[in-house]
Amino acid sequence: MKSITVVLLLGLGAALGQHAAAQSAGTYPNRPIRLVLPAAPGGPVDVIGRTVGMGLAEALGQQIVMDNRAGAGGIIGAEIVARGTPDGYTLMFAHSGPLAIEAAIHSKLPYHPLKDFAPVSLVAASPYALIVSPASPAKSVKELVALAKSRSGKFHFASGGIGTGIHMAGELLNLAAGIRMIHVPYKGAAPSMTALMSGEVDTMFNGVSSALPHVKAGRLRALAVSSAQRSALFPDLPTVAESGLRYETAGWYGLVAPARTPKPVTAKLQSQLHKALSTPEMKERLASQGIDGIASTPEQLTQHLRAELDKWTAVVKAAGLKAD
């Protein structure tokens, strides 16, 4: 009899919990939402995150406060969200750095990329541009590779931090071309571009959305894009693979919440995010930055993340980048 009572009480508790979650989703959101951008202002994560965040705020009818938390390749921002209250009011504009690459580099992180986050949806994908200063003698990927070989160990590429997508794009080029560019990490993609323009470093990859204004203004020269196909923003710019290298990578972005966020809440976020991404204004805004909007299920985001973990674990091992 006692065991039956316990089962009934457990069942009642679960039902009440589900009812509370449904009620919560019904009134959600009734106050501003914090969207953590695990990157410095001015880089692709920041630019794309703010664009998408504004569209989501309009769809939800609620203010979204952008919170840049740069450092450690996105680990700092990701830890904040992993430890956040699972109520839908703390979210992260996720990218490959903190959720895939850092997990490949470090055996211990202050969070688990799969267990400590509730997936909402993939949001966008965008290729990187391989860029140099206009003063550089390299005017193509082949010329850059030849220059790097002639200055092996003294040719430097910048990134927005160890473990960021643009860092790994450079390491992938090292492996594909058989060169040894030296990595110089900065505290964000924007500071690394400043360093490139000032001549502190020789080259770097960066999101096309961030690189485009500087390329158009003549402050930087684009040599290629990292994706399998050419970018609509740079139709005359070849891909890295067109130079004869086996090479392909791109930035991807998604929305996640802390683990244990009620499913009705994440479902509402997903539906409203998809609504925001489907508007003509958002499509045009993203396309003008060379970005493809993506609407996925939480399960598809999880599958994508697992594939990214496998991919970058192999690259980290091949490049000897394991930190601990």
Image (cartoon, grey):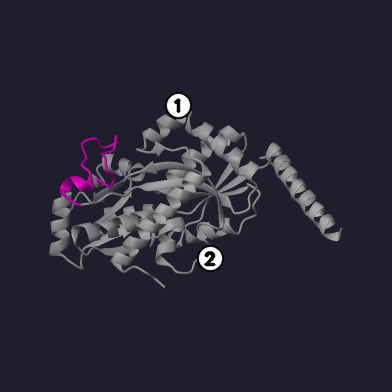
Q: Nearer the viewer, residue 244 or 148?
A: 244
Is 272 situated above or below 158? above
Q: Which residue is mark 1?
A: 280
**In the image, farthest residue toward the top:** 280
Nearer mark to the viewer, of 2 and 1: 2
Task: Judge from the rendering whether residue 54 lies leftward or rightward of residue 209; answer left or right.
Answer: right
**Amino acid at pointer 1:** Pro
Q: Is residue 232 magenta?
A: yes
* Residue 71 pos. (x, y %): 46, 61
Q: Which labelled disc corresponds to residue 110?
A: 2
Q: Nearer the viewer, residue 71 or 293?
A: 293
Please tell me how crowded label 2 is: few (under 14), some (14-19), or many (20+) other residues with Cα within 10 Å: few
Residue 180 found in image quarter: bottom left
Please say whether residue 185 is visible from this viewpoint.
Answer: no
Q: Is residue 121 magenta?
A: no
State the count of labels. Answer: 2
**Amino acid at pointer 2:** Pro
At a point 58% along the width and 42% down the height, the residue shown is 64
* Residue 239 pos. (x, y %): 23, 44
Task: Judge from the rendering whether residue 300 lies leftward or rightward of residue 243; answer left or right.
Answer: right
Are dots 2 and 1 in contact, CB under 8 Å?
Answer: no
At a point 79% along the width and 49% down the height, the residue shown is 12
Q: Which labelled disc corresponds to residue 192?
A: none
Please report whichever mark, 2 or 1, sits nearer to the chain's N-terminal start.
Answer: 2
Q: Secondary structure at mark 1?
A: helix
The residue stretch that appears in magenta: 225-245
